[in-house]
Amino acid sequence: MAALLVTLTIGLPWIGALLVLLSGDERPKLQHTIASIISVAAGISAVVLLWFTSDQPVLSIPMGSAFGVFTFVPDALGVLLAVIANVVGSLAVIFSIDYMKGNEQLGRYYALVMFFIGAMAGLGISGSLLLMFLFWEITAFCSYALISFHNDDPKAVAAGIKALIITQLGGIGLLVGALIINSFVGSYQINAFLAEAESLPFNVLVLLAFCFLAAAIAKSAQVPLHTWLPDAMEAPTPVSALIHAATMVNAGVYLVARFFPAFEIVPGWTTSVLVVGMISALLGALMALVAADLKRALAYSTISQLGYMFFAVGVGAVFASQFHLLSHAIFKALLFLCAGAVIPAVGTRNMRQMGGLRKSMPFVFTVFVIGSLALVGLPIANGFFSKELILEEGFIHGPMWAYIGMLLGVGLTALYVSRMVFMVFYGQSHGEKPIHDGLLWMRVSLSALAIGVFTTWLLAGVLSDLMAQTLPFHGIHAIGTFELAKEIVLAPATWVSLAVIALGIGVWILREPLAGIKNLLRPVARIIEKGLGFEQLNQGIINGTKNLSAALHLTQTGQLNWNILGIVGMLSVLFALLFIGV
């Protein structure tokens, strides 16, 4: 049964992608129907797979002596990633019924989205490093193609290429690590490596640890390789929800959590993960605080929230990181899809040109506030429980300076979320009245996610139990949901955090009396708006690969078949080199 569910979880989205392409763009209703039904079916398969989790392979594909065996291991860590990809992905697809209505390239859109979802599910359930790398690269291609979906827009194409180049640094790190592991362990199997990691030469383990960390930083858009993510907002908004909540950026957090047992003994590795997370949480929040573009503000928020997850892994709280991964997937998808309802209705992404929308868009306002409560981490919302668990673990197991840094991030989060809600929904309207308050299928998706904000934290006990059973190397202990909730509510760190949240909200409420301080900080805000110099650093990386960039630009026809041919060709060369031992 587990093998069948794994096949359906990964395979159904890919079958749906093929069927959508074959149905033809002249039949958009059929394409909407195929994509929606199959994505929901894949989501159900992924959820049912939770009852069949295992730390052993349930499906194996022999690939010859060079590549070993491609195995699929549905442990709780990987299945959770697949559930997020498929369930949140299906809601993004349903939202797209209204959002993409009238688009002439609907087949290409749905095919790429569903290919993306299937690849992310496969990445999570992969038991082989080479298979994981293959899915990793497919997600990179899909993100590139979807970011540059509007291929007649130079900004979109440039953003897609930028994302591809920066995230390929991560792909190189992962591939190098896989090759090194095979040469020392004699296998590409992840569990085989985790079992033998301590017996590897120390310098080899150090190299592996930082290769994988580099891969995770690039994929999850952590500082300093974060600048591709805000530019990725050129994609259609449901794609933004996918990248930020259900797919792409989750892979890096998953990678450091997956290999934590092997690398925690490497001096400086956990501290590096912790520092990357703390800096990303702070800088992401600061950049969200000064952003005028609604989607870019949410993108910076994603960088910040992923920083919390990296911080959690850095202090050894693997379960807390994945618990917050689930919470974030729900509330960030909700916020992005709300943006997808607001932006077409008002005709701008600039929050300074919005305002007063709570009266004309009461439904969207309500669900946006629900998502905001979770992002800030206020009680009852899922983000409260997962964020406070991270902070509690940081207070107990991490250095005090890092905990204080994360508390500062909590206050900044409350401040930028207050600013975002007020600019979009309060104050005076700066434009025409919206034409709708969320269409039918938009409301279906938004309602489901809003319910998820208040209910997914109830899965904490089930998830901790499944992880304790199926992750033998991680040392995770099972804990009941309400026992965990009681522990969080009674923890001193929680009340300190809530006080900091109140302070952050209070600063926004008192912004008029504090206007003098704001004016003094205006030069600092301008520096933050310009990206604190990281854009120049990332541009240097891109310039270092300018020949590749130029080649990609020359071959960027906007035609899916040529894009697929290119990515398949590159992967073929990589595997050919691997086969002959280069």
Image (cartoon, grey):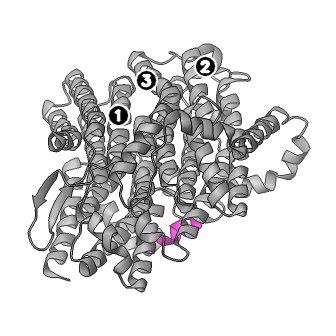
| 136 lies above or below 491 | below
Residue labelled with disc 2 = 432
The foreground one among 423 and 549 is 423
Q: Residues within 10 Å of mark 2 (few under 14, many from 20)?
A: few
Q: Which mark is residue 87?
A: 1
Is residue 354 toward the left or the right of residue 96 in the image? right
Residue labelled with disc 3 = 448
In percent of width and height, residue 182 lies at: 24, 76
Residue at 48% in and 23% down: 451
Residue 188 visible from this viewpoint: yes
Q: In which quarter of the image is the C terminus?
A: bottom left
Earlier-in-chain disc, 2 versus 1:
1
Q: Give the range drawn in magenta.
A: 535-541
Is residue 10 toward the left or the right of residue 413 in the image? left
Residue at 80% in and 40% down: 503
Secondary structure at badge 2 equals loop
| C-alpha separation, residue under disc 2 versus residue under disc 1 | 35 Å
| 500 lies above or below 532 | above
Earlier-in-chain disc, 3 versus 1:
1
| 512 lies above or below 523 | above
Secondary structure at badge 1 equals helix
Q: Which amino acid does label 1 sit on?
A: Val
Q: Dividing the picture into quarters, in which one does residue 405 lie?
A: bottom right
539 in magenta: yes
